[in-house]
Amino acid sequence: MKNIDKVQNLLPFGYLFLVILGIAKDSISYYQIGINIIRYSSIMDILISPIAAVTSHPVFFATILLLFVFYYNLPKILLKNEDKKWIHKISGIDKSDAEFKELPENERLEYYNIASIKSLSTFLISVFLGYGFADGYSISNQIKNNKLHFDYKLNYSDDKSEKAHIIGSNTAYYFYITEGNPDIKIAPVSSIKNLELLKNKMLDK
C-alpha cells in the first residue's frame, strides 16, 4: 500500500515534468523556423503537449514506451543481480558497497526505485530535447532548400483552395507553407473548411 501511495503522489509531478518537456520540445522545434509556439498555444495545448509529442511519430512513441517499460522493471532487475557489476554499469546505477548490501531488501529496492526515476528523467530530457532540435532542424532545412512535399490541399471557408505542406497544428491554429510561396502562414482553425490528403503513403499503391 505504501508503494501505491507513493506512486499516486508522484503521478501529478511526473505529468507536470512531461508537460514541461512537451513545451520545451515544441518551443525548440518551432523556434528554428521563427515561431514562438507558446504565443499560439492554449492551456489545453500545453496540457496535452507530452501526449501530442509522444504520438507524433511511431519511432518516438516506441522509444518512450520502451524507456518506461525498462525503467519500471529496472529496480527489480538490479536487486536480483546485485552481484553482477556489469548490469549496474550498463544501467548507470552502481551501489555495490558492503554497507549498502547489509541494508534490508526493501530499503535497497527503494534506493533503486529513486535512482531509476532519476535516470529515466535524464533520458527523457535528452530524448525530448533531441527530438525538438532534430524536428526543427529538419523542417527548417527543407524550407531553405525548397524540398517540401505539398501533400495537402487546404480548402478555406471562402471556397478558395491551396496546396500546402502542414508544418503542424494545435487546437487553434494551422502552421503551413503553400506551394509557390516560401513564407510560413499561420491560420486559425476556423478559417479552414477542410483538409484533403493528396498523397497518402499508407494507401497509395
Image: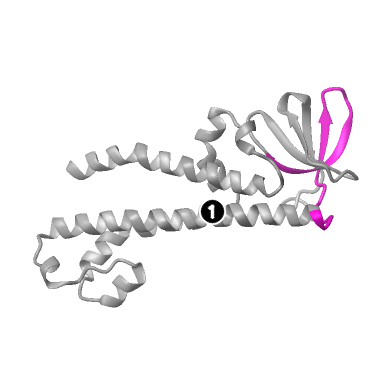
Residue 155 on image: x %, y %: 83, 31
**Which span of residues is magenta-colored?**
144-168
Horizontal placement of 136 versus 195: left or right? left
* Magenta highlight on residue 162: yes
Q: Residue at x 82, y 35 (%)?
A: 154
Q: Is residue 39 above or below residue 50?
A: above
Q: Is residue 124 above or below residue 155?
A: below
Q: Quadrant of the N terminus?
A: top left
Residue 14 visible in the displayed image: yes
Horizontal placement of 39 versus 91: left or right? right
Q: Residue at x 72, y 52 (%)?
A: 139
Residue 123 on image: x %, y %: 44, 58
Q: Nearer the viewer, residue 24 or 170?
A: 24
Residue 53 on image: x %, y %: 56, 45
Q: Is residue 22 above or below residue 104?
A: above
Residue 170 on image: x %, y %: 64, 34
Q: Quadrant of residue 173?
A: top right
Q: Nearer the viewer, residue 18 or 144?
A: 144
- The type of residue carrying mark 1 is Leu
Q: Residue at x 87, y 37 (%)?
A: 162
Q: Secondary structure at mark 1?
A: helix
Horizontal placement of 164 versus 188: left or right? right
Pointer 1: residues within 10 angstroms few (<14), some, or many (20+)? many
Residue 55 visible in the displayed image: no
Q: Nearer the viewer, residue 162 or 69?
A: 162
Mark 1 — residue? 129
Q: Quadrant of the C terminus?
A: bottom right
